[in-house]
Image: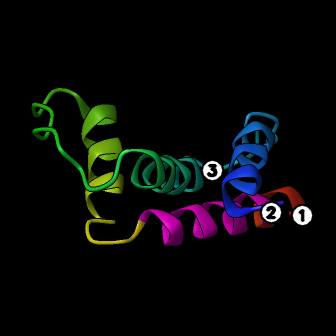
Amino acid sequence: MGLAEDFDQAAKDALKLPATTTDQDKLILYGLFKQATVGDCNTARPGMLDLKGKAKWDAWNGLKGKSKEEAMQDYITKVTQLQEE
């Protein structure tokens, strides 16, 4: 399978991760997924009362400059690591 197919499978597998997956790991996955599918963050940072939105935005924006292919590979690696834990 190619990178795109592996990424699609990892995205499906991520939905089945255990409930014990930490919020930090979920934020890492979110940022990598957005970087792989959209590219660099292209939205304004949410307001100060939207704590969840800000955390997600920060996770995505922290990956600025990472190529889509590199983000896909990192996402696949992270999902595989979480499945093995």
Left or right of 8 on screen, residue 67: left
Q: Looking at the image, do the residues carrying marks 2 and 3 touch, with CB atoms under 8 Å apart? A: no
Q: Residues within 10 Å of mark 2 (few under 14, many from 20)?
A: some
SS state under label 1: helix
Task: State which region is magenta.
Answer: 68-80
Residue at the location (57% across, 47% down)? 26
The quarter of the picture where residue 25 lies is bottom right
SS state under label 3: loop
Magenta segment main secondary structure? helix
Residue at the location (66% across, 54% down)? 4
The residue singled out by tag 1 in the image is: 84
The residue singled out by tag 2 in the image is: 80
Identify whether 63 is placed above or below 26.
below
The amino acid on which the numbered mark 1 sits, given as a three-letter code, is: Glu
Left or right of 13 on screen, residue 77: left
Quadrant for the N terminus in the image: bottom right
The residue singled out by tag 3 in the image is: 22
Residue 47 location (% of width, % of height): 10, 31
